[in-house]
Image (spheres, coloured by chain):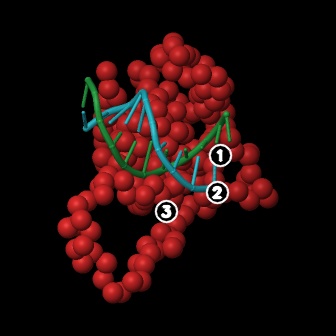
Chain colours: A red, B green, C cyan
Amino acid sequence: MAMEWTEETIARLRDLWQQGLSTAEIGRQLSVTKNAVVGKAHRLGLKPRPSPIRRAAKATPPADAATQAAPVAPPAAVAPKKEAAPAPVVAAPPAPEKEPALVKAAVAAPEPKAVTPAPAAEPAAEAPAARPARAPARAAARAALRPVSEPRRRSSQSCCWPLGDPGTPGFHFCGATPLPGKPYCAEHAQLAYVKLRSDRRDNVA
DNA sequence: CCCTGATTCGC
DNA sequence: GCGAATCAGG
C-alpha cells in the first residue's frame, strides 16, 4: 500500500523540508524513501531547494522541424539565468547550521525527564529489508533523541514537534499553538532553535 | 562508491 | 496520487 499522506505527515514533510533536511533524511524520519519524499514534495508544489543536478529538459523530445524553425530564440540572445541565490530558506533561527535543528536541540537539551528511553523498536514496524545496514543505527539514534510527551493532534496552526516514533502507531505532534513564523510552539522552539554559544550561562544546565 | 535531488511512468 | 526505477551531478 502506498504511503498515507495525512495532514500530519504532510505538515512534517513541509517542516523538515523547510528545515533543509535532505530528502533521504526526511524519508528516514517519515519512514518512507527519499523518492517518496521528493515525489510528494513535487506534488505539494514545494521544492525550492538546491539541487545537485539540473537535468536538461528531456521531457520534450526533439520536436518537428517546424517547431525548431519557429522563432523560439529571440535576438535577445541573453541567457536569463535565474536568480543566483534563491535567498536563504529557513526563517533564520539562531543556529541554522547544517544539522537539523531537531537533532541538535535534542543533543544540547536532553530534557532529563521528557526523553524517552529510546524504544529502539522500529525494526519490527519497518519493512524487513527496507533498510539495509546503517539504517538501524541511525534509526536508533534518532529514536533516542526524540522527546516524548502528551499528544494533542492538530493539523494547522500547530506545533510540529514530533512526539513518538514516526511511522508507528502513537506517533503525533505537539500540536500547541506555534510561534509566528515558526513551526514550533514557544516551548519547543526553545529546543529546536538552541543557541550555539557554548558559553551560554545556562548552557546544558 | 557514497551522497544528493529530478524525472518518468507503471501502478 | 503514489513512489520505484532511473537518471544525473557532486
Q: Quadrant of residue A52?
A: bottom right
Q: Residue at x 47, y 17 (%)?
A: A127
Q: Give amino acid for label 1.
A: Lys
Residue corresponding to mark 2: A97
The mark tally for this picture is: 3
Q: Give amino acid for label 2.
A: Glu
Disc on res. A104: 1
Question: What's the CA distance linking mark 2 and mark 1?
Answer: 10 Å
Q: Quadrant of the N terminus of chain A?
A: top left
- Residues at marks 2 and 1 on the same chain: yes
Q: Disc 2 vs disc 1: which is toward the camera?
A: 2
Q: Secondary structure at mark 1?
A: helix
Q: Is residue A116 left or right of residue A186?
A: right
Disc on res. A89: 3
Q: Secondary structure at mark 2?
A: loop
Among numbered discs 2 and 1, the one appearing first in the sequence: 2
Question: What's the CA distance linking mark 2 and mark 3?
Answer: 12 Å
Instruction: Judge whether A188 appears above or below A182 on screen.
Output: above
Q: Position of residue A180 (x, y in %)?
A: 41, 60
Residue under mark 3: which chain is it in? A
